[in-house]
Amino acid sequence: MAIEPWKWVDREHGLVDRRIFSDQEIYDAEMERIFRRTWLALGHESEIAQPNDFFTTWMGADPVIVTRSGDGIKVLLNMCRHRGGTVCRTDRGNAKLFLCPYHGWSYGSNGALKVVPGLETDYRHGIDPADWGLFEAPRVATYKGLIFASWNPDVEPLEEFLGDATFYLDCILDRVEGGTELVGGMRRWIIPTNWKHAAENFVGDSYHAAATHTSIMRVPGLEGAGGRVKKPFGYQAALQNGHGVGMWLADEEDARGGYGHLAGVDDYLQTIEDQLVTRLGELRGKRLTPVHATIFPNFSIEFPFASLHIWHPRGPLKTEVRDLTLVDRAMPPEIKEMLRRHCMLRQGPAGTWEQDDMDNWSQTTYSSLSPTGRGLLANYQMGMGHEHTRPDIPGRLDNKSSDINQRNMYTRWAELMAMEPPAPAQVAAACRPGKEAGQ
Ligand code: FES
Ligand SMILES: [Fe+2]
């Protein structure tokens, strides 16, 4: 099948062909053309705070190990250079050596090949371990604690890729002295959905909340958990590179409150108000609260105390989620614990809100397998022709119930899908084997 993304995404009419949610060839092209080209979010620096700490995750369809070596943060393909065994088979930990269980080749935390059983006695023709280190992502960078990597050596600088999204990300990453950290463990599970249905929901789908989450919003005390302002007006902001964010904006000066059962969070916000205003300014310090966002392609955030969701595609019909809870490092321990429990209650495979979402994404994915249904186009027309800008809020804006961000995301999807994939040899040449320096 020819890859013809502009036939599948009709941006002029706000329509999308359902095949992009279930077709294997389109999925394979996404892995090459999107996930091997852009920056991808992997996690947070606090997950690998100590030397030799590591966690395992994915870059598109590639399994990787993220380590803190003596050479800094490394992102290594989790594949033994000998015959392709998986060298690390656990979620996270601390290890000086990764031992491949098949024949025993072992690698340092910087990816360098350290041990080859029988190097002297059995490899009689001689091999140089320096040539056989783990394959390494050529570009790794952090933004205020968040770790990103790319397989593309020519990818733009990370801050350029994030662009105006940093205006909103800073509302959680840079609000107080000391930055952020993760609390609790990591929730990791598989949803029977195409990854784009999760990404598009977070990029701009406020519209679904009233219908999808009716039941949880009727539970006294939980209905306001996640809001911050009392009488808000909402915006969606479509940003460059397919990113998007939804936000509340209060026009009144003092617009705090509204955390329902998280009353302690309101108190905490009161204590950091001066810092918020000093660091972020009056608008973001007092009146503007981001609510949800997706950094295209697969990193979503639920503000303001913050669930991070990374949607890892595992085939067209499956998505593996890596779900993390982010708090201010300087926050009182009891507030951190409150937020850890809040995110667990709300998100995750048993989360009160996420269960509702997952079921809908599964339905919208599987409907694209219906021989009759897949010929009918999906509608992303809400708010067409009503986008506007204002000088104090970055992005192309529309009301909070609008498909502006989804149209922006699928336009970026089509732009990338229309480009030739980066040549594998080019990527391979840029990924040098891990070297001996440091440990
Ligand atoms: S496949 Fe890893 S040591 Fe052989
Ligand atoms: Fe939802």
Image: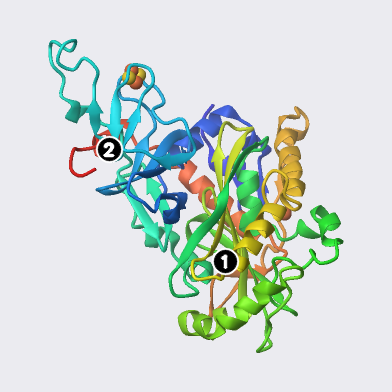
Measured as percent of width and height from the top left, residue 48 is found at 40, 50
Measured as percent of width and height from the top left, residue 437 is found at 18, 42
Measured as percent of width and height from the top left, residue 385 is found at 66, 66
Tag shown at residue 431: 2
**SS for tag 1?**
helix
Q: Mark 2 Cα within 10 Å, few/some/many (few <14, many 20+)?
A: some
Q: Nearer the viewer, residue 152 or 98?
A: 98
| Residue at 43% in and 70% down | 178
Q: Nearer the viewer, residue 308 or 383?
A: 308
| Residue with the mark numbered 1 | 333
Q: Mark 1 Cα within 10 Å, few/some/many (few <14, many 20+)?
A: few
Q: Taking the image as drawn, is residue 387 in sight?
A: no
**Residue lying farthest left?**
125
Viewer-side label of 2, 1? 1
Which image quarter is the N terminus in?
top right
In the image, residue 178 above or below residue 352: below
In the image, residue 68 above or below residue 29: below
Label 2, label 1: how many angstroms apart (C-alpha)? 42 Å
Measured as percent of width and height from the top left, residue 361 is found at 71, 43
Tag shown at residue 356: none
In-image side of 65 versus 187 (left or right): left
| Residue at 70% in and 62% down | 402
Q: Image quadrant of residue 125?
A: top left
**SS for tag 2?**
loop
Which image quarter is the C terminus in?
top left
| Three-letter amino acid code of the residue under disc 1 | Pro
In the image, residue 171 above or below residue 184: below
Give the mark nearer the N terminus: 2 vs 1: 1
| Three-letter amino acid code of the residue under disc 2 | Cys
